[in-house]
Amino acid sequence: MTRISQGSHDQANDAGDFSLVLGGPLFQLFRRAHLAGDGLELLRRRIVVIALVAWLPLLLLSVIQGTVVGSAVAVPFLFDIDVHVRFLIALPLLIAAELVVHERMRAVVAQFVSQGLVPATVRARFDAALENALQLRDSAVAEVLIIIFVYTVLVLGVWRYIAVDVPTWYAVPEAGSLRPQLAGWWYLFVSIPVFQFILLRWYFRLCIWARFLWQVSQLPLAYAPMHPDRMAGIGFLPRVTHAFAPLMFAQGALLAGAMANKILFGGAVLTAFTLEIAAVVTVVVLVILAPLLVFALPLAAVKRTALREYGHLARRYVDEFDDKWLRGRAARDEPLVGSADIQSLADLGNSFEVVTGMRTVPITRDSVVQLLAMTLLPLAPLLLTIFSLEELLNRFLTIVF
């Protein structure tokens, strides 16, 4: 079982125990409240409790104020798509993503050591990078600053973005502003901050991950330019992006919920959000992929060196091959058919092709496509606001067949 870092980070010396999420004040609070085990167990209990804290009081208060259904307001609680998507879909996904990232990232980080990329001469610096990442992950100051930022900046910003200019279960327009209703106060000061804190905490962790990768990229790693992964031996690294799929789906769902309300109750049309969708999707995908780009320069340097060295080796070999077989230096009784020299020349050519085809950007097309798909998938139902289901099916069948 993974040991928990509490003050001392003795697990930093074991890359296989590295976890981007298994620590911090909130995690320790979950453990004391029996909402998480040492290895992020009790996921269902954690999701149910947090989601209910954010969503259930809104339902109960809406019942009390008579805005849960009916025509008392333009947007009753049960018809507010954004609030249900935010707290019953996106929030559980953000919580579940912790377990996915924890399990997959540990294996990826461990491969730096297990595949021999970290020589003994730089192991201490690699361990120091792990230690620094764990210290930031466990920082109480960081989570306090996130809370302060949420209440001073993000709450009002989110409130303005999700609000529609009609009476709703949480607020009514009054003198050019929105006056919160009874449920609106819980929404504004509890539900939204809980969600924003967990979301912003995720982005803080992504910053820790980016910093760790940058520190590792500065080390003289034992790259292998002839490695069949065509990434000098770090071909395992792009696979870590798959772990962030739940996080990307949650981001897409968050965007879809906010747009759905503005389309259904604010009179907007989906096409009006084209630039917004493109910007949000681009940014969130880059947040996941950009940290991998720190290896672009080291890989480019490795490729240049390898091409030069293998070029010299290839020239030396072909010169000797030419002298032996074309200039008559081979022994008269040495047969050309079945000669190992021919196979060696072919092997050398294949090796040189591997070096030539080595990628200097550790990002695969599959990773990009998956991240884009997971982010855009929650937006698909909004197409029904433009096309009927029959039209969508016809267009899909036309594209496929």
Image (cartoon, helix red, strand yellow):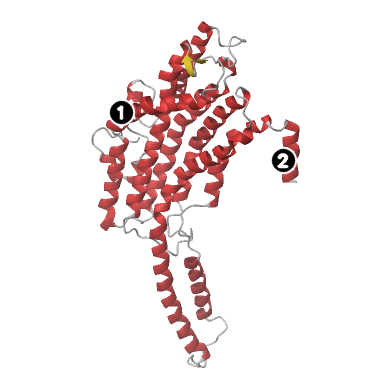
Q: Position of residue 239 (x, y in %)?
A: 48, 47
**What amino acid does circle 1 point to?**
Val
Q: Where, by quadrant of the figure, is residue 308 drawn? A: bottom left
What kind of element bears circle 1?
helix
User: Tag 1 or tag 2, which sits nearer the N-term?
Assistant: 1
Residue in the picture at 52% in, 11% down: 62
Q: In the figure, is residue 6 to the left or right of 109?
A: left
Q: Which residue is mark 2?
A: 396
Residue in the picture at 50% in, 37% down: 248
Q: In the figure, is residue 378 to the left or right of 292?
A: right
Crowd tier of the residue under label 1, counting other residues whose Cα lies within 10 Å: few below 14, some 14–19, many 20 or above: few
Q: Where, by quadrant of the figure, is residue 135 drawn? A: top left
Total residue callouts: 2
**What amino acid does circle 2 point to?**
Phe
Residue 41, visible in the rendered structure: no
For residue 181, the mark is none
Residue in the picture at 57% in, 18% down: 166
Query: Who is closer to the viewer here, 198 or 166?
Result: 166
Residue 305, visible in the rendered structure: yes
Q: Which residue is mark 1?
A: 144
Q: Position of residue 258 (x, y in %)?
A: 54, 28
Outermost residue on the front side: it is 175
Depicted 116 relative to depicted 276: above or below: below
Compute the Cα span from label 2 to label 1: 48 Å
Q: Position of residue 364 (x, y in %)?
A: 51, 52
